Image: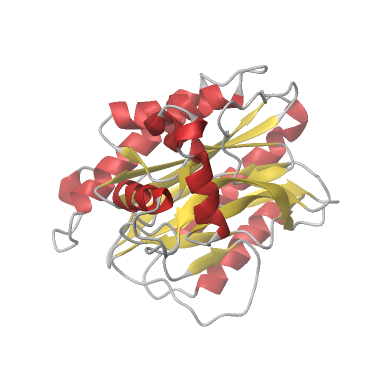
Amino acid sequence: MGASSNFPQEMENIDKYIKAGRIAARVREEIKGFVKEGMPLIEVCEFVEKRIIDLGGEPAFPCNVSVNEIAAHYTSPPNDEKSIPENSLVKIDIGVHVDGYIADTATTICFNPEYEGMIYAAEKALEAAINMMRPGIFISKISSEIQRVIERYGFKPISNLTGHQIDRYLLHAGKSIPNVSHFSLEKISSKCVYAIEPFVTVKEALGKVKDGSEKYIFRLVKHKFSKKRDKAQSLLEYIKKNFRTLPFAERWLKRRFGSEDAYKQSFMTLLSSRCVMGYPILIEATLKPVAQAEHTVYVDEKEVIVLT
């Protein structure tokens, strides 16, 4: 990643994107040597989130630790007892923000040599997509190249997971970057930030994700609750102040309030009243393993800079 002098000064707070990207990249590299078979998933989540804070950032979303056929959106709930299985494929998705300016990156850790080619295909597709990024290019061209590279290595892209434009306090803002060929007149815009994230599975898989029954990542969607002095309103105000529009984990509430008894009933009230929504875990529809690679890039008029 280049020094800040490489960035055009007219982009507001580019230094904060740079800082978020540096932190995200450092934690991503550290986690590769940290994750072991048999390790509790909650230990991975908490290591990532603590390192982000120690390095001067804030988590932009809960650390995702998605194993094998789970493609995305798994973070540990409070008291999670799950651990890294033997011979597994583990996707670690990391988000960092500095004053709302977000960097998003992911890596796949492999404990089974059978899956190494799938990771390589994801990384090569990501590299090819970044090399194509420039203002005015059709997003469909980038998507077609991602699919072409993945299929060249004998694998299949996940068709209903996409990369995405990023804005301040908005992880998914505006344009999407699908991982499969499609018709669209959307183009990459100058002076914008994008996360590119190929998801790859085996050739015999359906190549789509479905919603699982579990939801462990949440986001504020309504800023008002009907009962002004209700405990749920106080919790809503806390969520709004601390997380804004960014996703959060129930673990973070337990850490703040000390016990589930202190917040659980109010939290369930916010969910049932749809002030807060949950993201279902995403599972490959035929239960085949999934690999992921991801970088966040800034697209300038003259160059594309990988922030992560």
Image spot of residue 198 (x, y percent) = 59, 52
Image spot of residue 27 (x, y percent) = 40, 30
In the displayed structure image, the side of residue 111 where residue 197 appears, left or right: left
284 or 144: nearer the viewer: 284
Image spot of residue 206 (x, y percent) = 81, 57
In the displayed structure image, the side of residue 301 where residue 271 appears, left or right: right
Q: Is residue 144 visible?
A: yes
- Considering only vertical position in the picture, is 211 above or below 176? above
Q: Residue furthest bottom?
A: 185
- Considering only vertical position in the picture, is 290 above or below 141? above
Image spot of residue 4 (x, y percent) = 18, 46
In the displayed structure image, the side of residue 33 where residue 300 appears, left or right: left
> Image quadrant for the N terminus?
top left
- Considering only vertical position in the picture, is 103 above or below 110? below
143 or 106: nearer the viewer: 106
Please report the residue visible at 45 percent of the width from the left and 48 percent of the height from the top: 295
Q: Quadrant of residue 87?
A: top right
Please report the residue visible at 33 percent of the width from the left and 47 percent of the height from the top: 238
Please report the residue visible at 29 percent of the width from the left and 37 percent of the height from the top: 57
- Count of picture labels: 0
Q: Quadrant of residue 149?
A: bottom right
Please report the residue visible at 61 percent of the width from the left and 21 percent of the height from the top: 40
Q: Is residue 1 visible?
A: no
> Image quadrant for the C terminus?
top left
- Considering only vertical position in the picture, is 98 above or below 173? above
Indicate how the structure is coloured in the image: secondary structure
